[in-house]
Structures are given as C-alpha cells and as structure tokens.
Amino acid sequence: MPNEKSSLAKARRPASPRSREAARIDEIFARLEAADPHPKGELEHVNVFTLLVAVVLSAQATDVGVNKATRALFQIADTPQKMLALGVEGLCGYIKTIGLYPTKAKNVIALCAQLIEKHGGEVPCDREALQALPGVGRKTANVVLNIAFHVPVIAVDTHIFRVSNRLPLTKGKTVEQVEAGLEKIVPERFKLHAHHWLILHGRYVCKARRPECERCIIADLCRFEGKTI
C-alpha cells in the first residue's frame, strides 16, 4: 500500500525550523490572548479626536502623566474647533506638566487648524493623511488607525521594540524594521490586538531594567539570554 507508506513517512518527518518557529509565535499570541482577550490602550479619550491629541502628547511621556493633564482639557475641548479656540497659550496651561509641552501645544493647535481646513474637522482614517498632520509620525498614525478605526496595524514603541527583540519575535535595529518584521510574522487573527498585548507585556512584565520572568506566561517560549529564571 504505497499511499499508506507515503503518509506514514510524512507523519514521521520532523517539522521544519520555519514551521516550528511559526508554531512558537502562534502559541505566544494565543497565550497573550487567553490572558487578556480584549486589550485596550491606556490613554484616556472621549472620541477619535481626543485620542489623536492624547497620542501626540504621549511622545516621550507616560500615559499616566498624559491622562492627568488631559482629563480637565478634554472636558472643555473635545473637538478641533474648541481646541483651536484655546490657542497655544491656553493649551499650555492644561498640559504644562507634560514634557516638551510648548512644542506639543504648537503642534496640536496647528493639527486642529489642518483638520478643520482639510478634513472638515474629522480625523481621517488614512495613514498618509494622518502623518501629514503636525506632530503626527508613523507610530501615532498607527495607534489611531488601530484603536479608533480597528485597522490591524502595529504601532512599535519602546516596549514593543524591546519585547520583539528579546523574545525574539522579529529582530531589528530600528522601529521601522521591527514593524515590518512583525507585520510579516504575526498571524492574521492576532494582528488587531497584537500591538496592545506587546505594549502591556513590555510595560508590566518584560520590563527594561529587569524582566519579571517569574510571572511571565510565555517564559518557556522566550529565548532571551538575560531571562531571570
């Protein structure tokens, strides 16, 4: 029975390195999903516009610090028109506890003017249009696309950069390289939330100074030489 022998031979054939790696990556995200099926970003916002502003303000700042500053701000300025009416000086009064606030205030006010002039006061669901706004880079655009418009893109910040290189998922010397690598290897069914899972894992478990491997749910799948267990 040649067909039966052929089937048995295929069954005994060891998995290729590529397929084993794909299975490892799949298991990593399956566990992250099981632990947190519906992850959410930690920047507080009330609509798409305030999300965009919060992400712009979060550059080189913590989400906690941004949230403290924007709670009062978003109560009185939750549209481009209201924010623009504050002006740079008025906005600075609300965000002066955030690093680089003078530059960020100028960018936010200019961003509001451009949203009104070119997009009817609405935040566009388009990466190129988003990146054309003052103060908006690729990472910010990706965060807005992912959270507000549910586009399965991955916004690589310092946490994702670290986790991806450590595990590793994909290695890269720049955030652009890591983003491109993750886009290729993250299974489609996990892409929508992959950005959140990796950020939260890096922020609370796989920390920069000392990863807390003793409570990591994917420690056995990690190849980081500096593991603490």
Image: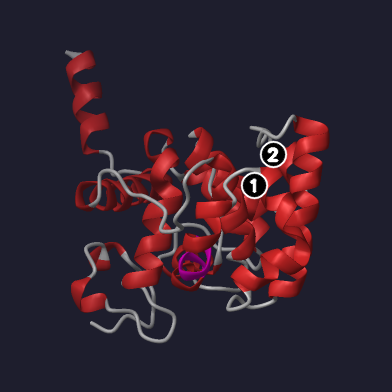
Q: Is residue 87 left or right of residue 222?
A: right
- Determine the residue positioned at 47% across, 61% down: 71
- Residue that label 2 marks: 127
Residues at badges 2 and 1 in contact (C-beta under 8 Å)? Answer: yes
Quarter of image, res 37: top left
Q: What's under tag 1, amino acid-wise? A: Ala
Question: Against 66, is 74 above or below?
Answer: above
Give percent across and percent down for residue 229.
23, 82
- Residue that label 1 marks: 141
Q: Nearer the viewer, residue 89 or 26?
A: 89
Query: Would residue 32 be visible to someone looking at this image?
Result: yes
Query: Would residue 132 be visible to someone looking at this image?
Result: no
Question: Against 138, is 229 above or below?
Answer: below
Give percent across and percent down for residue 31.
24, 51
Whether the magenta-drawn stretch holds residue 52 is answered as no
Give percent across and percent down for residue 104.
72, 66
Q: Which residues are magenta?
A: 66-70
